[in-house]
Amino acid sequence: MSRKVQKIDGCALGIMLLRDGNIHFTDIKPEDADIVAKLAERLSATVSAGVPVVNRTPSAPTSNAELASVAWSEYERAKIASKRWSDSTLKENKTAINLFLQIAGDRPMSVYSNEDFRQFVQGLMRLPKYYSTSPAWRGRTISELAKTGPGGQEPKNINKQIRFLSAFFDWYCKAYYEIRTTHTLANHLVEEGRKTVKDSEIRKAMSDAQLQKFYQACLADVDDKRKKGAAFKIWLVPLAAYTGARIGELGQLRTDDVRQVDGVWVFDLLEIEDGQSLKTAASRRQIPVHQALIDGGFLDFVKEQREKRRKWLWGNDKVIDKADVASKTANRLRNKIPEISGKNNGVSMHSVRHSFITKLKNCSTANDEERADLAGHARKGTEGDTRYYKTDLSRLQKHLNEIMYDFNIVRWIDLPG
């Protein structure tokens, strides 16, 4: 394999001749992409200015490993093994690659060109809004809609797909050729205008009165606390209100995730088991158990689950996507209250988390870093601040106990069952 830098049409390119006779372009600057594309067309119909390796003669791939779908499978396995992706990130990336394969075709990685990338992005722009769920597009394939659809996708959505795929192509270049090679997919990001946010789209915090009604609706849905699924409904509102945790985070708690650390009872939010996933790295945190939860008998409930040798706090061992089921249960119960139901009034399950963060800001003495630690937000500051320093749990407990709501938690021991 030989490599040299050649100046062509005013731009300096790294050109590598591989042992199998393939040509490999490196050091391509974004502004030189068009020149390289023209050069590629002159060299061979199968030369790609997008991905580095080029076959000199058109032919079918000699190995399935060259196909985008197979390369993607390897990429997916690598990301899952590294635990860098949450379940939601994996789902979003799968959507992106499926769109690419249906619009650009499942072809050898070496033959995708700048023109293929441009056509792919044009296809994304033709996809109608709600193309996968609206009855109006039932029976139409993505490849058909990408050619003749009316459009309607938000630029932000389109760019999200491009960035996911750009990361995939980056990985492919680095994994197969041990160098960082510039491809042209990222050059096709579309312009994002400023979006006007409607009042109905702004997420609002739930008031104490709304939380009280929500809590009562949850209790009314339970006639026996021992029944399957009852415990989650009973503790849903108190835990969401006094921890600020996302509903999915609560739904995937193990019994061992409620434990003592340095003398403080905490919720230890982790993703170490199948069925556990967190939104970001900052979401991995320890939240002290609020005194109101202790007074309501939450630790007694946890003790009962331990005595029953239950691994998962809510007894949902057989549920695969615990976070999703928890969210659906919470939304079903929320929809029983007209003033907090639906999607267009600015109130959602996430509004309980907004209530917690608002209380933490207005009613506690916690500083910005301590509020970030409790809410699972990334800290602002130097690497030392964000990566190595965490607030003492006893201080977090003090700040947490400063917030209160105008509803009383019914003690676990007093509930029927």
Image (cartoon, rainbow, N blue to C red):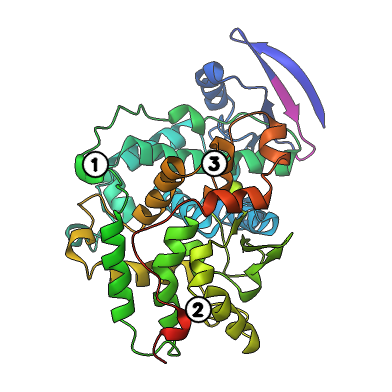
Say what secondary structure mark 2 lies in.
Answer: loop
How far is the residue under mark 2 from the one under mark 3? 37 Å
The quadrant of the picture occupied by the C terminus is bottom left
Residue 202, x across and y down, in percent:
27, 43
Can residue 280 be seen at all in this image of the molecule? no
Side (left or right) of 136 relative to 132:
left
Q: Of the residues under marks 2 and 3, which one precedes in the sequence?
A: 2
Give the spatial CA distance, label 2 vs label 1.
38 Å
Above or below, comparing residue 344 to residue 122 in the picture: below
**Mark 3–mark 1 contact, CB under 8 Å?**
no
Q: Is residue 284 left or right of residue 242?
A: right
**Side of 196 where 302 appears, left or right:** right
Q: Which residue is mark 1?
A: 151
Q: Which mark is residue 319?
A: 2
**Residue count near mark 2 (Cα–Cα under 10 Å), binned few <14, some 14–19, many ≥20:** few
Q: Nearer the viewer, residue 230 or 188?
A: 230
The quadrant of the picture occupied by the N terminus is top right
Label of residue 265 in the image: none
What amino acid is at disc 3?
Ala
Q: Is residue 231 magenta?
A: no
State how far apart marks 3 and 1 are (Cα): 47 Å
Residue 404 drawn at (x, y percent): 42, 56
What amino acid does circle 1 point to?
Gly
Q: Which residues are magenta?
A: 14-20
Query: Of the residues under marks 3 and 1, which one precedes in the sequence?
Result: 1
| Neighbourhood count class around disc 3 (C-alpha, 10 Å): few under 14, some 14–19, many 20 upward | some
Question: Residue pushed farthest right?
Answer: 1
- Residue occupied by mark 3: 366
Looking at the rendered structure, the kind of residue marked 2 is Val
Label 3 SS: loop
**Which of the pair 321/303 is nearer the observer?**
303
